[in-house]
Structures are given as C-alpha cells and as structure tokens.
Amino acid sequence: MDILRLILGAALLTMGQRLYWLFIGGIGFVLGFDLAKHFVHGQPHHTALVIAFFVGAVGAVLTFYFQKVAILAGGFIAGGYLFIELLRELGKGPGNYYLLYFILGGVIGAILMKVLFRWTLIVLSSFIGAGLIIRSFHFGQGLAGTLFILLVLTGIIVQAVLLGRKS
C-alpha cells in the first residue's frame, strides 16, 4: 500500500487541480481503503485494496457524468478527511465526535470548492498528496511535520504555476 500512497500522493500534489477526476478518484480510493480496513477485519489485505480501487474508480467515473455534484462531494469528503487527519496529527483525535468533525470539515471543504474551485482544489490536493507521501514513509514526528509543510508548499507552487500556464 505504501507505494500506491506514494504514487497517488505525488500525482495529487502536482496535478490535483489539472486532473480533478484524479483528485476525486484519489480521495475515493483513500477513503475506501480506510473504511475497508475497519469493516473487513480478518480478510486478506488485497480485499481492502479491491474495495478502495472500486470506490476510487466510481468517484472518478461519476466526475465525468455528474461534474458539479462530484466536485462538491469531493470537496466534502476531502475536507472531512483532512480535518480528521489534522486532529489526529495534533494529538486530539476525533474520539466520539468523529462523524460530527467529519461533517464539519466536509461542509467547509464543499463550500470552499463551490466558491473558489481551482484554488481549493490546489490546496486540498496539495495537503492530501503531501499527507499520502509522508504516510508512505516512516519518518520521526519532527521530520514528518517539516517535510509535510515543504511538500504542501511545493504542491501549491507547482500547481499555481501550471494554472498560470493554462490561462
């Protein structure tokens, strides 16, 4: 799974706003894998991967047919996932309020995606891409935090340059 996180993380970090279907599919993959780990205990590891690929593929395909809904749903899922991960990294953990925090982060992500589509896509894909890259390695806490910030900034700059070239 680490190599898949690394590849997906690098793709989201650098191309998230250009390939928004990849962003939606990538978010679906990550969420599908995390949920599958919780619901298919005792099953082989590849079972969770199959579920993750299926959820990611459905998300990516739906983006082509229901673009506006998929983009808002992607913003919701990315915002909720990112908020939960941020709480975990800060040592707070969502505890009994997991769903509430996920919804709160999701609503913020969906609103930002609606109002500032390209820039929200750049920032969310940079954060999630950087997080996936960091999780694919096993750094110490201090080094991981520093690398995460550097990767996020790099992703935002690379995607902003690509956005400027597109205009």
Image (cartoon, rainbow, N blue to C red):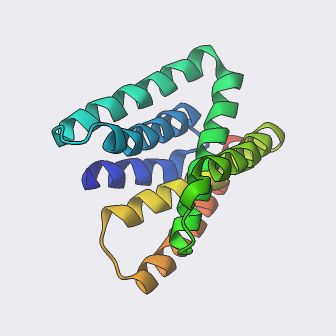
Q: Is residue 42 left or right of residue 135?
A: left
**In this rendering, does residue 159 appear at all?**
no
Q: Quadrant of residue 37?
A: top left
**Quadrant in the picture for the C terminus:** top right
**In this rendering, does residue 131 appear at all?**
yes
Closer to the camera in the image, 108 or 23: 108
Q: Position of residue 35 (x, y in %)?
A: 41, 41
> As displayed, is residue 39 above or below residue 64?
below
Q: Position of residue 8 (x, y in %)?
A: 39, 47
Closer to the camera in the image, 75 or 122: 75
Which residue is at the far top?
65
Q: Is residue 56 left or right of residue 16?
A: left
> Which residue is drawn at the image coordinates 44% and 48% (left, top)?
11
> Which residue is drawn at the image coordinates 39% and 61% (left, top)?
133
> As displayed, is residue 115 above or below residue 54?
below
> Which residue is drawn at the image coordinates 54% and 35% (left, top)?
24
Q: Is residue 160 left or right of residue 140?
A: right
Which residue is at the far front?
96
> As displayed, is residue 102 above or below residue 130?
above
> Which residue is drawn at the image coordinates 63% and 62% (left, top)?
157
Which residue is at the far bottom?
142
Closer to the camera in the image, 69 or 8: 69
Q: Position of residue 20 (x, y in %)?
A: 58, 35
Q: Position of residue 110 (x, y in %)?
A: 73, 40
